[in-house]
Amino acid sequence: MSALMLLGGGLIGCTPGHEGTYGGGQVCVDRANRENALFLKAVSPVLPSDKRVSVDEWNGCDSTDNGASLTVLVDPGLRRDQLWKAFVKAGWSPASQACAPRCRFQLVHQMDRRLVGIALEETRETGREGLWVIAAAADACWDDRGYRCG
């Protein structure tokens, strides 16, 4: 019976020592906080605090034990084309040059050994109206196989 419980626990990442591999619990939250701090640092040269209406952080620590993203609601005075040009001027590149064909990002930027991606989205959805910048890791170093982000 204990061997069956150990096998079952191993499949869901609950055996001792797996928090480092799967990122469960506080380890996952700490990683997500570091990731989101990196994403905010990446977009801040283009979106300083006076150009941000709100910043929302997301992490998958309660369900998938991986992943993080940052969503920034941009000042209503900025247009999408202005924002795109500002990111390009700050060194961001079209994503097709840097990440896989199924990449969901429009622009990417290298920060040290990491690749951060952004998507610009406009929505008219009630309560979420505006221009949003969604930032996340474009290097796929944190997934169901573990955390490999330096």
Image (spheres, rainbow, N blue to C red):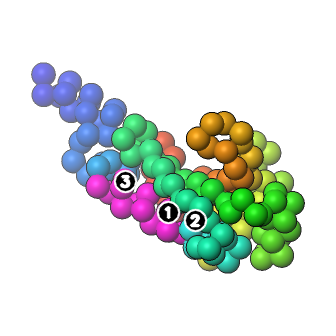
Foreground residue, 117 or 140?
Answer: 117
The relative height of residue 2 versus residue 105 in the rendered view (above or below) is above
Residue at mark 3 = 28
Whether residue 85 is visible here, answered yes or no, is yes
| 28 falls in the magenta region | yes
For the residues bearing labels 1 and 2, Cβ distance under 8 angstroms: yes
For the residues bearing labels 3 and 2, Cβ distance under 8 angstroms: no
| 53 falls in the magenta region | no
Foreground residue, 75 or 89?
Answer: 75
Instruction: Give residue 109's position: percent from left, percent from top.
Output: 72, 68
Q: Residues within 10 Å of mark 3 (few under 14, many from 20)?
A: many
Residue at mark 2 = 39
Please state if 128 lies on the left or on the right of 36 as rendered. Answer: right
- Identify which amino acid the numbered label 2 is placed on: Phe
- Identify which amino acid the numbered label 3 is placed on: Cys
Whether residue 137 is visible here, answered yes or no, is no
- Identify which amino acid the numbered label 1 is placed on: Glu
Instruction: Give residue 81's position: percent from left, percent from top.
Output: 87, 60
Identify the residue at horizontal 63%, vertical 56% (top origin).
73
Determine whether the residue tagged by mark 2 lies in a helix, strand or loop: helix
Residue stretch in magenta? 26-38
Label drawn at residue 35:
1
In the rendered image, the quadrant that contains the N terminus is: top left
Identify the residue at horizontal 58%, vertical 54% (top origin).
71
